[in-house]
Image (tube, rainbow, N blue to C red):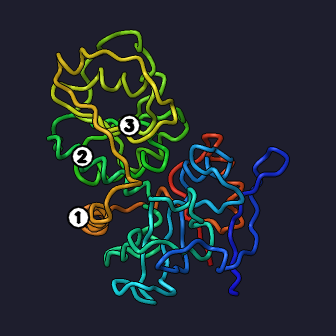
Amino acid sequence: MTEFKALVVSEQDGRYVSNVTTRQIDDLPEGEVLIRVKYSSLNFKDALSASGNKGVTRNFPHTPGIDAAGVVESSSVPELSAGDEVIVTGYDLGMSTSGGYGQYIRVPAAWVLKRPEGLGLRDSMVLGTAGLTAALCIDKLEQAGMIPGQGPILVTGATGGVGSIAVAMLASLGYEVAAATGKATQADFLKGLGATRIVERSELEAGKEKPMLKEQWAGAVDTVGGDILFNVVKSLKYGASVVTCGLTAGTQFQGSVLPFILRNVNLLGVDSVEQPLVVKASMWDRLSLQWKTDLHNLEKEIALDDLPAEIEKILAGKMVGRIVVRLD
């Protein structure tokens, strides 16, 4: 049996403890493709899994990691061969299926995407689920009619993974970007990504009791949810859209139909987990070609042993940008 290193979360006396330990390949779940993982990334969902959130992971011990990029070790399907460089994001990876915080994963072939030529394995994990989600959000807004020059595009939770990549991508595509954050000290970071305006989170929290607010935004990417999301809805320009993909500020809000009726606005949802592989492939192609964006200002690389400390940071709301996890 081949041994490998992995982060394993276990329950001890009612607490969830993360340790890097040794696992056996034979202990991995069934699947057509065995992958040697080279890089992963840190997402809020990974931190929830590592802290015992039953909405993400029910059974422990468990290895989180909803993203993985690596090399096929063996495959029982003709579409994938040993040596192929591949990406796996979403589906059940890192939730109930042993995830990318191990040096090996074994998964169904239907989850596996060959690495697009325009991205290296490491670059793909700077993006990871966060980059895929940001791309899906921008694509959905553009399908709804958003184009550069219509006015500012708001990004909430702008220092987080999805938010920071969305700011950088929108700016690179020629949009005027307003970045909303509760971290006032990160204004220079956000301006360095291309934001032309910094919006304090408190500004977006004001007026939740009002049915309508002043028109401001030609579009928005919301990564936080809650009352902030509906305040964004109430602040959209006529005919504009907001796409929502996160819930760190809550899953509910107090709302009114007035913005939809009087301003003809749209509230759109994006899921990056269960998207068909063909949709994910099309987004990855765009991320590697016409939407390829310089993200060196927002990424940090860590080793597997550093993960527990970074998980604590993201749970405390202290993480900025993207964390790339090196498995070798």
Determine whether the residue tagged by mark 2 lies in a helix, strand or loop. helix
* Residue found at the very far right of the displayed protein: 13
Give the residue displayed 14% in from the left and 41% down from the top: 145
Determine whether the residue tagged by mark 1 lies in a helix, strand or loop. loop
Q: Is residue 88 above or below residue 273?
A: below
Q: Is residue 197 left or right of residue 289?
A: right
Give the residue displayed 61% in from the left and 59% down from the top: 64
Label of residue 222 in the image: 3
Reading the chain from its start, which is encountered first: label 3 or label 1?
3
Amino acid type of the residue that numbered disc 3 sits on in the rendered structure: Asp
Picture coordinates of residue 142, whole percent (x, y): 19, 46
How dense is the environment of label 3, judged by Cα within 10 Å: few (below 14), some, or many (20 and up)?
many
Determine whether the residue tagged by mark 3 lies in a helix, strand or loop. strand
Q: Are marks 3 and 2 in contact (CB under 8 Å)?
A: no
* Residue found at the very far bottom of the displayed protein: 82
Amino acid type of the residue that numbered disc 1 sits on in the rendered structure: Gln
Residue position for label 2: 140
Q: Nearer the viewer, residue 213 or 284?
A: 284
Residue position for label 1: 290
The residues tagged by marks 1 and 2 sit, at their Cα atoms, a distance apart of 16 Å
The residues tagged by marks 3 and 2 sit, at their Cα atoms, a distance apart of 13 Å
Give the residue displayed 64% in from the left and 43% down from the top: 315
